[in-house]
Image (cartoon, grey):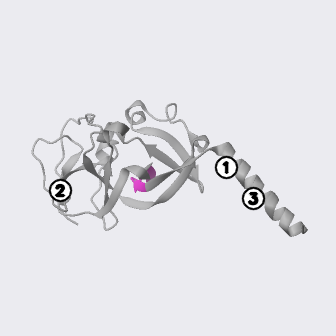
Amino acid sequence: MSKAREASEARRAALARRAVERGIRAEYLAFRMADEIYAVPIAYVKEILKLPPLTEVPRAPFDVMGVISVRGRIVTVRDLRRRLRLPEAAPTRRSRILLAELGPEQGGTGERVGLFVDEVLHVYRFADAEIESAANVLGSELAEYVTGIGRQEGEMILLVDLKPILGGAKAPAPAQRPALGGRTGA
């Protein structure tokens, strides 16, 4: 066997050992909000939409922007900025709605919900060993929505837990609900 072939096989064996040590990798869809990078398990994201016209819902919870129709099906749109208590911002050309769904077996209601985000980035892959606990780092308000922190390519990615968001948990209520201010179309 040639030295080049032996070196190649040794590299493959080392990569395989590292993959086993790290564990199975899960895929997360990353998006930007308020100059931070967040990500959700890609298995829960069914579709990515440009921001269509929204219909406001009277007396809706604070994080509900309104409803949209997706192929004849009414979908509630929640503003993740509001849910995570980030400063509000007007939609841009890059704003998107992630259609996400958690089935009852995953701790959700099975309802498809739209999640308004500033910009969709790309997919990251993390092994369990690459995810740091967020409990000690984040404030108590945000800790219930973040399962961990991943780091890749010099970026810190906050991994969002969709169960409290899509599972019917109540959103934190502010003192006063602001107007939608231009979020009725893109």
| Type of the residue with mark 1 | Ala
Q: Is residue 123 above or below residue 40?
A: below
Could you tell whether 103 is left or right of 176 in the image? right
Q: Position of residue 66 (x, y in %)?
A: 17, 51
Kindly identify the residue that appears in the image at 18 percent across and 46 percent down. Answer: 178
Kindly identify the residue that appears in the image at 38 percent across and 60 percent down. Answer: 119
| Type of the residue with mark 3 | Arg
Crowdedness near tag 1: few (<14), some (14–19) or many (≥20) residues, C-alpha within 10 Å:
few
Mark 1 / mark 2, whichever is N-terminal: 1
Q: Decide which of 37, 13 is in the foreground and name it.
A: 13
Query: Mark 3 touching mark 1, by CB under 8 A?
Result: no
Q: Decide which of 139, 64 is in the foreground and name it.
A: 64
Tell me the quadrant of the picture where the C terminus can be found: bottom left
Crowdedness near tag 3: few (<14), some (14–19) or many (≥20) residues, C-alpha within 10 Å:
few
Q: Position of residue 180 (x, y in %)?
A: 18, 53
Q: Which residue is mark 2?
A: 73
Whether 136 is among the magenta residues is no
The circle drawn on residue 96 is: none
Q: Which residue is mark 3?
A: 12
Tell me the quadrant of the picture where the N terminus can be found: bottom right
**How many angstroms separate mark 1 from mark 2 (CA)?**
42 Å
Dot 2: element: strand
Q: Which residue is mark 1?
A: 19
Magenta stretch?
Answer: 31-39
Dot 1: element: helix
Mark 3 / mark 1, whichever is N-terminal: 3
Mark 3 / mark 2, whichever is N-terminal: 3
Q: Decide which of 109, 38 is in the foreground and name it.
A: 109
